[in-house]
Amino acid sequence: MSLSVLTVPEGWTLEPMERQPDHAFLSTPAPLRYSVTIDFKLRGFRKGFSSIGMLVGEAWNQKRKKYGGRGWRQEIVDDAVAYLKESLR
């Protein structure tokens, strides 16, 4: 999977994780550097730099959004960007 086709805001970085080919690391520009790890295999994302643990929105009392269909990878990235923008407020 090529990350170059996915778009993120200017100044943000989306990098593949070398040892986890189904994961990518999304971070905001300095100085705050908030980040998430996108798990394309499980179709979700986690806070910070982590390839294990619960995905954002995954809790005993909350259903996690299901990603599918054409463009689902970009949709995950867009939701991760929105999550980080909310954290920056």
Image (cartoon, grey):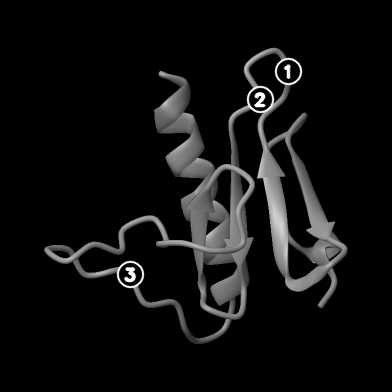
- Give residue 33's mark: 2
Q: Amino acid at mark 2?
A: Arg
At label 2, counting other C-alpha atoms closer than 10 Å, the crowd grade (few under 14, some 14-19, many 20 or more) is few
Q: Nearer the viewer, residue 60 or 39?
A: 60
Residues tagged 1 and 2 counted as in contact (Cβ below 8 A): yes
Q: Position of residue 77 (x, y in %)?
A: 58, 57
Task: Tell me the tag on residue 65.
Answer: 3
Ranked by sequence position, the earlier of labels 1 and 3 is: 1
Q: Secondary structure at mark 2?
A: loop
State the separation of the CA atoms marked 1 and 3. 29 Å
- Disc number for residue 30: 1
Q: Residue furthest front?
A: 52
Asked whether disc 1 touches disc 3, contact meaning CB atoms under 8 Å apart, the reply is: no
**Where does the N terminus fall, quadrant-wise?**
bottom right
Going by the numbered disc 1, the residue's amino acid type is Ala
Residue furthest out toward the left = 61
Report crowding for label 3: few under 14, some 14 to 19, many 20 or more residues within 10 A (C-alpha): few
The secondary structure type at the circle numbered 3 is loop
- Please tell me which residue lies in front, 18 or 66: 18
Residue drawn at the location 70% of the way across and 12% of the way down: 31
**Residue in view at x 31 percent, y 58 percent:** 57
Residue at 40% across / 18% down in the picture? 89
Label 1 element class: loop
